[in-house]
């Protein structure tokens, strides 16, 4: 069939290109090799318009990971979206999305980077509103308008970068780090990265973007859209490192981790739980980046991409099987009915928690040990480890609702793992979620810094993960009924479960401020302004012309009234004289 041919060709091309990019990236890393390509488009007098591409180990490995996950998602979509009549359009949108991300990754130039940045925003809007209903429309508008803040910040930084004579920011990051103009540009770039990576106060759009089809969620929330901000800040890290902007970003990213971890423990929508876990891991990347470790942030970005894409694919297979129902309370005993999907989901969850020798362990354990060696304040330290424990709590809460207890599904659910096009991408990503952490660790960290910690701090990371896993199972086994809670406690739970009211603040509160201001200005605009302006003149002319037309209508009453008026007027004049 035509849709399978399009999916198959795209899958083969992206898969082969991903292997080639990863191989080239590792080769460039080991040989310390960089390729800088400049393509002159046209020249007018002394102005040259050049398209610049940067191929180093960081861009090539990231591009390889994006293409690998995209190939798995497209092959998965050939089954998941098989009932869609417009699947050709869907696959083309996904390919445009991957192309935009590729342009952003290899661009050392802010103008060409904006091309990929805005391409991500536009195509993500088209994908979020793919299921055409009011909820998808609202989610798409929230996503697009939240990201427009970052687009404006990049446009301002493009204008400000003219002070240096070129838009190739890669030339200036190492040499003008203390320049005041570069500090202002770095502030704008941090603002853009915060919007795209959904840090507080721009966090509301990321769970709302779950209105998109599940394969899109797997691609967007693992390696493409939300990681674009982190990748851009990694590139700009030599400029921002050590400035006060880093401390602000550290505080906001740690609070994002904490907020997302709390919110996921009160959420019952399967896709939103995974979306909030993405938000929490983005906080981990941003926080370790703001502590001055861009390579660690990049390492966690790559490992997180694999197991997060796997989580979404497993969730999509479950949702597909239980007839598009996303409430985790309607699951149960999935390990009996869908053993392959359950195995992949559990491995992805354990990798997310940072259990030893899975992909997440190598990055998260290293990040937390580096944090323990930093001289940061006690507040950051405590919130960081509490957020890590909350990751284990909501992961094992998801395992409890999906794998344990009774079968709560509908009678018409078709639960099986027989579809090859659904299970094979999950198995491929599972193998990567197990091995990619150790492989990247061997390749990227050829020289280790000595991490010397006492025993209680060395075991703190593993203890927090195990304690969080135990808490996740125990709390959900207690089955606390919300009806027994007091009203104040219910309000507090509502506050925690609604991302600290950020969706409300980002939509209703923000729009009501401008709408109320508009109403006050409307008094002038639609009343006095209209009366003395065009509408007032129009009404006066119409009234005058209608009266004149009435006078000329040959009516006997008007003639008699006019005659008596003139007689009265002449008598008054004679009386005065």
Image (spheres, rainbow, N blue to C red):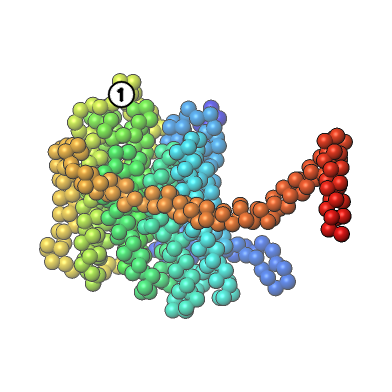
Q: Position of residue 511 (x, y in %)?
A: 47, 51
- Asked if residue 273 shows in the view, the reply is yes
Residue beneath the point at 25% across and 46% down: 491
Residue beneath the point at 79% across and 43% down: 547
Q: Position of residue 307 (x, y in %)?
A: 33, 46
Q: Which of the two residues, 7 or 336, is positioned nearer the viewer here? A: 336
Q: Quadrant of residue 31?
A: bottom left
Q: Which residue is mark 1?
A: 410
Residue beneath the point at 43% across and 65% down: 190
Q: Which of the two residues, 529 or 517, is positioned nearer the viewer here? A: 529
- Asked if residue 439 shows in the view, the reply is no
Seen as rendered, the residue at the extreme top is 411
Q: Which of the two residues, 397 or 543, is positioned nearer the viewer here? A: 543
Residue 263 horizontal side relative to residue 233, left or right: left
- Which quadrant does the C terminus fall into? bottom right
Residue beneath the point at 87% across and 55% down: 574
Q: Position of residue 46 (x, y in %)?
A: 70, 73
């Amino acid at each position: 069939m035509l849709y399978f041919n399009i999916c198959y060709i795209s899958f083969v091309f992206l898969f082969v290109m991903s292997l080639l990019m990863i191989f080239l990236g590792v080769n460039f890393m080991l040989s310390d090799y960089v390729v800088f390509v400049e393509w002159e488009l046209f020249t007018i007098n002394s102005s040259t318009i050049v398209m610049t591409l940067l191929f180093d180990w960081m861009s090539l490995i990231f591009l390889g990971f994006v293409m690998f996950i995209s190939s798995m998602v497209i092959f998965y979509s050939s089954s998941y979206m098989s009932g869609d009549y417009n699947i050709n359009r869907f696959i083309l949108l996904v390919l445009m999305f991957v192309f935009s991300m590729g342009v952003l990754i290899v661009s050392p130039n802010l103008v060409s980077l904006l091309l990929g940045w805005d391409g991500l925003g536009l195509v993500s809007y088209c994908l979020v509103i793919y299921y055409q209903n009011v909820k998808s429309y609202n989610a798409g508008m929230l996503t697009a308008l939240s990201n427009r803040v970052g687009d404006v910040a990049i446009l301002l930084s493009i204008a400000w970068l003219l002070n240096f004579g070129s838009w190739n920011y890669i030339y200036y990051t190492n040499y003008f780090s203390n320049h005041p103009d570069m500090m202002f540009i770095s502030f704008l770039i941090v603002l853009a990265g915060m919007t795209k990576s959904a840090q507080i106060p721009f966090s509301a759009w990321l769970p709302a973007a779950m209105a998109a089809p599940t394969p899109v969620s797997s691609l967007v929330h693992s390696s493409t859209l939300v990681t674009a901000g982190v990748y851009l800040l990694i590139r700009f890290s030599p400029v921002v490192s050590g400035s006060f902007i880093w401390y602000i970003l550290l505080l906001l990213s740690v609070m994002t981790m904490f907020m997302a971890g709390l919110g996921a423990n009160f959420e019952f929508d399967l896709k939103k739980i995974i979306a909030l876990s993405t938000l929490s891991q983005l906080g981990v990347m941003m926080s370790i980046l703001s502590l001055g470790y861009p390579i660690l942030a990049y390492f966690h970005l790559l490992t997180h991409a694999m197991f997060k894409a796997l989580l979404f694919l497993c969730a999509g297979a479950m949702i597909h099987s239980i007839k598009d129902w996303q409430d985790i309370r309607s699951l149960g005993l999935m390990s009996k009915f869908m053993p392959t999907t359950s195995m992949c989901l559990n491995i992805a969850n354990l990798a997310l928690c940072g259990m030893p020798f899975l992909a997440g362990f190598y990055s998260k354990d290293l990040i937390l040990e580096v944090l323990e060696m930093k001289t940061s304040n006690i507040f950051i330290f405590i919130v960081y480890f509490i957020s890590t424990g909350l990751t284990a709590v909501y992961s094992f809460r998801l395992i409890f609702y999906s794998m344990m207890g009774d079968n709560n599904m509908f009678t018409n659910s078709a639960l099986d793992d027989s579809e090859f096009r659904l299970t094979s991408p999950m198995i491929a990503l599972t193998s990567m979620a197990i091995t990619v952490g150790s492989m990247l660790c061997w390749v990227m960290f050829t020289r280790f810094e000595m991490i010397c910690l006492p025993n209680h701090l060395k075991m703190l990371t593993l203890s927090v993960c195990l304690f969080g896993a135990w808490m996740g199972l125990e709390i959900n086994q207690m089955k606390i009924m919300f009806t027994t809670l007091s009203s104040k406690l219910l309000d507090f739970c509502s506050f925690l479960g609604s991302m600290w009211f950020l969706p409300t603040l980002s939509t209703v509160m923000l729009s009501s401020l401008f709408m109320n201001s508009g109403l006050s200005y409307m008094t002038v605009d639609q009343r006095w302004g209209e009366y003395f302006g065009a509408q007032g003149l129009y009404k006066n002319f119409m009234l005058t012309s209608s009266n004149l037309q009435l006078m000329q209508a040959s009516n006997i009453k008007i003639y008699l009234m006019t005659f008596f008026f003139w007689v009265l007027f002449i008598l008054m004049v004679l009386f005065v004289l």
